[in-house]
Image (cartoon, grey):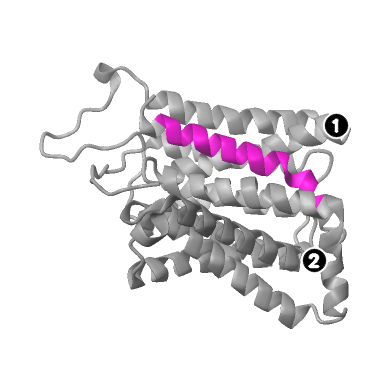
Amino acid sequence: MNRARLSELCLLITALIWGSTFLIVQRALDDVSSLAFNAARFAGAALLFLLMMLASGRLRKARWNRRLLLHGTVLGLWLFGAFSLQTAGLQYTTSTNTGFITGMSVVFVPFASLLIAKQRLSAATWMAAGAAFAGLYLLAVDGGSLSLNRGDILVFFGAVCFALHIAVTALYAPRYETMPLVTVQFATVGVLAALLSGLTETAAPLGERLAGFAKPEVLFALLVSVLLSTGFAYWAQTWCQQHTSAARVAIIFATEPVFAALTGVIFAGERLGWSAVLGCALILGGMLYAELADRRPPDEQPQRKPDAPPRGGDGCPRQDSGRRSS
């Protein structure tokens, strides 16, 4: 299995983790605020990565410089903006609308990649993104309909931040070692979330706000989040985007609500209507189409000009650099 296929498998596992751990985190948020939880999970993930690098002797060997700190902070700002806007929007809109609008990033990412990373995308990628978008809509309206409100505007800009985070990761990931870049990103989100939590959540005393973290279900959710849905997931995204395009990442991440729906059916007794089933099929079908389109025999692949640079499966130039990665 080459690195491109391995990276896409890792991304699919990441989407599975995000979708399957949604219920765990959702239940934990009954006892702690989302901002406080996000501050703890990202700060915890940053500390975990620092300890891992220290134990392996890579902390001193890592190339810590201003550009790494700057670019890691930029990634952290986009990720913090995405989480904060999504959380604020949830106060005024439904989880159905939030899931669908956030999923719209699958359409935003190709445009962001074109503008930021200058990545030209194949027709198969555009078609897969369209199928995933249609599938997300059907999954969202299952058993009801979408009605927009002011919270949707906040969630919409959160989706734009998610898309830009993926696109900018594609730009920065090949330049640095994965773990230092991700650590700076985590630390940025953790600090900003803690500051925003301290500024906006002042109604209850600090001790009362922190008491929720002592509950077993919250500690378990925090452990799962630090290790899997934050630590492994964003490490995987950053590493994988050295070997695949941002648009492909968005298409694979569109499977997250599919895994979330299946988790709800298996563990929460939820039921899926025909609209949701069709939506799941479109999302998975779009991802498989983009994958299979890249595996056509050489004589079926479009011929490129002799002087054109080698291109990846999405029509994106591949840089074969000797940079180190984690």
Local crowd size for mark 1, using a 10 Å CA cut-off: few (<14), some (14–19), many (≥20)? some
- Rendered image quadrant of residue 152: bottom right
Camera-side mark, 1 or 2: 2
> Where does the magenta region start and end?
5-26
Name which residue type carries label 1: Arg
Vertical comparison of 11 with 82: above or below? above
Vertical comparison of 143 with 221: above or below? above
Question: In the image, residue 278 lies at what x, y percent?
Answer: 69, 29
Which secondary structure, mark 2? loop
Vertical comparison of 278 with 257: above or below? above
Left or right for 75, reference 215: left
Left or right for 228, reference 185: right
Question: In the image, residue 268 lies at what x, y percent?
Answer: 87, 36
Q: Which residue is mark 2?
A: 33
Q: Identify which residue is drawn at 35% across, 34% down.
A: 313
Which dot marks residue 271?
1
Which secondary structure, mark 1? loop
Q: In the picture, which quadrant includes the N terminus?
A: top left
Is residue 284 found inside the magenta-colored segment of the image? no
- Rendered image quadrant of residue 180: bottom left
* Earlier residue among tags 1 and 2: 2
Name which residue type carries label 2: Ser
